Image (cartoon, helix red, strand yellow):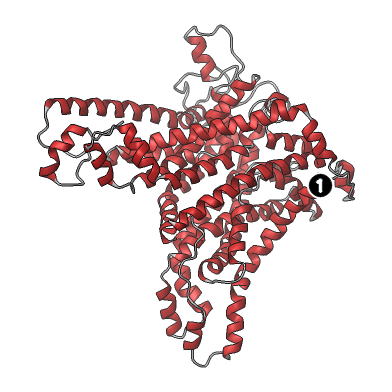
C-alpha cells in the first residue's frame, strides 16, 4: 500500500528538495533494490484497485446486465446478458405503469425541492448572518431533528396526514418531504451563505440598497451554486424515500412513487427480475446524473464551510 | 459542518449609513425581528411536522393505542404498560436488540475500515486512477437504497441468483441455498449492502482529510525509519481524529436506523421474526398488527438510543470548532 519507499527518498532528498516524493512522477536515478520495490508496490496497487472496482461496480453492472437481458425473467442467469434488448424497459413503462410512477415522483420531488429550497434559504440567512437570542438553540434543534429515525415519525405523521384528509395523495407526501429535507438544507446552505463576503453586503448598503434589494441582487446570485447543490440533495431524498411513501400512499396504486412502484413486480412465488432490474435502472439514472453533477461542489461546500468555522 | 458563527455584520452599522430611511428606533426593531421573520416559515414547518409528531409519538407510547383509537382519535392512557411489555418481551432481548446492535457495530467497523483503506489507496494513486476509482465509488454511493437492496437480493436469489448458480456450477453446492431464511446469512447480505452503500462517504471524507496531513511530518518519520503502519497510527490517525469521530458517529446513527435495507429483503417485512430489528419491529407492530401504542414505545426507545449518540456527535463537532 505504500509508495514512499524509504531508501530512495532519503537518497534523493538533497538533490530534489522537499515535496516531490510521489512515486507516480518520473523518478531519476534509482538503485535496483528500490525499483524492484516500486514494481512490487505498483502490482499490489493494481490488484487492490481491480478488486475495489469489481466490488464497487458489480451491483450496478448486474442491474444493467439483467435489465437489458430479455431472458432475465425466465432462464438462468450468466455473467453476460443472453439476449440484449429493451423489452424489459418497454414492459415496465407500459404494462408496469412505471411512466405514471415516474411522473408522480417527479412532481413530488420537484415540489419538495422548490418549497424546501426557498424556506431553507431564508432560515440559513438568519442563522448565518444574524446574531440573536436562542440562535444556538435553533441550530442545535436543527442538528438534533436530523437524527430522529423516520420510524418514530411515521406513526404520528400518518395520523396527522390522515386528519388532514391527505392520505393517498401526492400533496400529503410533499408536505412530509419538505419537513424531512429542511434541516439538512438549512445546515448545508448556512455554510454557503457564510462564505459570501460580508464586505459585498456592506457595499450594497453603502450604495443605499435596502435589505431585500441586497438579498436579491447580492446574496442570491452568490449563493446560487450552494442552492443548486442543496436542491439536488433534497431531490434525491424525495426520490429515494421509501417508508413514508409506502405508509401514506398504501391504498392508491395510481399515486405510487418510483421507490414503492417496484413492489408490484414481486409475485407470490416467482419474481419478475428482468422488470425489477429495468425499473431499478430507470430509478437510478436520474440520481446518478445529479450525484455526479454536484458531488464536487457539495464536498467543496462542506469543506469551505468547515474551514470558515 | 461547524457550529461556530462566521463573522456577522452588526445590523446597526448599515442602518446608520442609510440616509432618510425609517426612524432609527423602528429600524432597530426591524433588525431585531428580521432573523425571526426569516426563520418563521422553517420553524413553523419543523414544529408542526417534526417536533409535534415527536411529542405525539411519546404520548402514543403511553396509551393502548389501537385501531379504534386511531380511527376515533380518543385517548386511552395505560401508564407505562407498553414499555413494561417491550422490556418483558423475549423478542427484544434474544432477537431485536442483538440484530440491531451487532449489525450496527459490524456495519460501522466494516464501513469505516474499508472507507479508510480506500482513502489511503486513493491518496497513493496518480490522478488518472484516482479519478477512475473516485467515479466508481460515486456509482456505489449514488445507488438508491431501495434499488441497491433489490440488486443484492437478486444476486443472492435462491432460485436463479448468480451466487447460487455459480456455486452450483462450480460443484460446491448440490442444491440451491436460501440465504434469506437464516438470520446470519440474512444479516450478512444486509451488511454487504450497507457497507457497499456507505463506504464511499467515509472514503471521500477521509481522503479530504488525508490530503491535509503534513507531508513534512510523514517524510520525517519515514527518514527515521517508521514503517507504513507506524506512520498511519502515529501521525495520520491522530491528525485525523476529528474526521474519524464525525465519520464514525454519523455511520453509527445511520446504521442503527436502517429500515428499507432490511424491510425489503425476503422475510424482512415481519414474516420472518428472526430478522427483526428495532425499526422494523416498531413498524410491523404498528402498521401490521395495528398496535400503534406498542410500536410507538419501540420507536421511542430507538429515538433515545440515537439521541444519546447524537449528543456525543455534537460534542465532537464542538470540539472541532475549538481547534
Is residue B5 visible from the viewing direction of this image? yes
Label 1, residues with CA under 10 Å away: few <14, some 14-19, many ≥20: many
Residue A130 image-quadrant placement: bottom right
Residue A294 is situated, as x and y percent measured from the top left of the image, at 44, 51
- State whether residue A29 is above or below residue B205: above
- State whether residue A16 is above or below residue A110: above
Task: Tell which subunit mark 1 falls on.
Answer: B
- Identify the residue at image location x=45%, y=39%: B200
Q: Nearer the viewer, residue B293 or B3?
A: B3
Quadrant assignment for the C terminus of chain A? bottom left
Indicate left or right for A91 with A160 as reference: left
Q: Nearer the viewer, residue A136 or A235?
A: A136
Is residue A276 visible from the viewing direction of this image? no
- State whether residue A93 is above or below residue A173: above
Can you name the residue that lies furthest to the bottom here?
B20
Residue B137 is situated, as x and y percent measured from the top left of the image, at 42, 37
Indicate left or right for B278 with A59 as reference: right
Q: Which residue is mark 1?
A: B60
Residue A73 image-quadrant placement: top right
Indicate left or right for A40 with A137 as reference: left
User: Of helix, strand and loop, which one carries label 1?
Assistant: helix
Residue B236 is situated, as x and y percent measured from the top left of the image, at 35, 41
Quadrant assignment for the N terminus of chain A? top left
Amino acid at each position: 500500500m505504500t509508495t514512499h519507499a524509504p531508501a530512495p527518498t532519503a537518497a534523493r532528498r538533497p538533490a530534489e528538495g522537499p515535496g516531490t516524493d510521489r512515486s507516480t512522477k518520473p523518478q531519476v536515478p534509482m538503485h535496483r533494490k528500490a525499483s524492484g520495490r516500486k514494481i512490487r508496490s505498483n502490482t499490489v496497487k493494481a490488484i487492490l484497485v481491480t478488486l475495489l472496482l469489481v466490488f464497487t461496480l458489480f451491483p450496478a453492472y448486474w442491474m444493467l446486465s439483467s435489465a437489458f437481458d430479455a431472458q432475465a425473467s425466465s432462464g438462468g442467469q450468466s455473467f453476460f446478458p443472453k439476449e440484449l434488448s429493451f423489452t424489459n424497459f418497454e414492459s415496465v413503462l407500459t404494462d408496469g405503469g412505471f411512466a405514471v410512477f415516474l411522473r408522480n415522483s417527479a412532481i413530488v420531488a420537484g415540489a419538495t425541492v422548490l418549497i424546501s429550497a426557498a424556506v431553507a434559504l431564508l432560515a440559513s440567512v438568519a442563522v448565518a448572518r444574524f446574531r440573536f437570542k436562542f440562535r444556538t438553540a435553533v441550530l442545535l434543534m436543527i442538528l438534533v431533528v436530523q437524527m430522529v429515525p423516520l420510524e418514530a415519525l411515521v406513526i404520528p405523521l400518518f395520523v396527522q396526514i390522515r386528519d388532514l384528509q391527505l392520505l393517498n395523495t401526492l400533496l400529503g407526501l410533499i408536505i412530509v418531504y419538505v419537513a424531512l429535507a429542511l434541516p439538512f438544507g438549512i445546515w448545508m446552505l448556512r455554510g454557503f451563505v457564510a462564505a459570501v463576503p460580508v464586505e459585498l453586503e456592506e457595499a450594497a448598503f453603502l450604495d443605499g440598497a435596502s435589505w431585500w434589494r441586497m438579498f436579491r441582487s447580492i446574496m442570491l446570485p452568490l449563493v446560487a451554486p450552494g442552492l443548486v447543490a442543496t436542491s439536488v440533495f433534497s431531490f434525491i431524498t424525495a426520490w429515494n424515500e421509501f417508508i413514508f411513501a409506502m405508509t401514506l400512499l398504501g391504498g392508491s396504486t395510481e399515486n405510487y412513487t418510483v421507490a414503492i412502484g417496484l413492489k408490484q413486480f414481486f409475485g407470490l412465488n416467482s419474481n419478475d427480475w428482468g422488470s425489477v432490474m429495468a425499473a431499478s435502472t430507470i430509478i437510478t439514472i436520474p440520481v446518478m446524473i445529479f450525484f455526479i453533477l454536484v458531488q464536487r461542489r457539495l464536498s467543496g461546500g462542506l469543506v469551505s464551510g468547515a474551514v470558515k468555522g | 459542518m461547524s457550529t461556530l458563527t462566521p463573522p456577522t455584520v452588526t445590523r446597526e452599522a448599515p442602518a446608520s449609513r442609510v440616509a432618510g430611511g425609517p426612524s432609527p428606533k423602528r429600524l432597530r426593531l426591524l433588525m431585531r425581528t428580521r432573523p425571526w421573520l426569516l426563520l418563521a416559515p422553517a420553524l413553523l414547518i419543523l414544529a408542526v411536522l417534526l417536533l409535534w409528531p415527536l411529542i405525539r409519538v411519546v404520548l402514543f407510547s403511553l396509551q393502548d393505542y389501537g385501531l379504534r383509537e386511531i380511527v376515533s382519535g380518543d385517548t386511552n392512557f395505560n401508564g407505562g404498560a407498553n414499555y413494561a411489555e417491550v422490556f418483558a418481551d423475549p423478542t427484544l432481548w434474544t432477537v431485536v436488540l442483538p440484530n440491531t446492535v451487532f449489525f450496527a457495530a459490524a456495519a460501522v467497523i466494516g464501513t469505516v475500515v474499508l472507507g479508510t483503506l480506500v482513502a489511503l489507496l486513493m491518496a497513493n494513486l496518480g490522478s488518472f486512477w484516482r479519478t477512475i476509482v473516485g467515479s466508481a465509488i460515486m456509482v456505489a454511493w449514488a445507488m438508491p437504497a431501495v434499488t441497491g437492496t433489490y440488486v443484492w437480493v437478486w444476486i443472492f436469489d435462491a432460485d436463479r441468483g448468480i451466487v447460487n448458480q455459480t456455486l452450483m456450477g462450480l460443484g460446491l453446492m448440490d442444491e440451491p441455498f436460501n440465504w434469506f431464511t437464516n438470520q446470519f446469512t440474512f444479516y450478512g447480505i444486509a451488511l454487504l449492502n450497507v457497507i457497499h452503500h456507505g463506504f464511499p462517504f467515509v472514503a471521500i471524507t477521509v481522503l479530504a482529510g488525508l490530503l491535509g496531513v503534513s507531508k513534512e511530518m510523514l517524510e520525517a518519520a519515514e527518514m527515521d525509519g517508521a514503517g507504513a503502519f507506524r506512520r498511519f497510527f502515529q501521525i495520520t490517525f491522530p491528525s485525523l481524529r476529528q474526521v474519524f469521530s464525525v465519520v464514525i458517529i454519523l455511520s453509527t446513527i445511520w446504521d442503527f436506523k436502517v429500515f428499507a435495507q432490511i424491510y425489503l429483503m425476503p422475510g424482512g417485512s415481519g414474516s420472518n421474526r428472526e430478522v427483526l430489528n428495532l425499526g422494523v419491529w416498531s413498524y410491523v407492530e404498528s402498521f401490521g398488527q395495528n398496535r400503534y401504542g406498542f410500536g410507538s414505545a419501540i420507536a421511542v426507545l430507538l429515538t433515545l438510543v440515537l439521541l444519546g449518540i447524537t449528543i456525543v456527535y455534537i460534542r465532537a463537532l464542538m470540539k472541532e470548532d475549538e481547534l
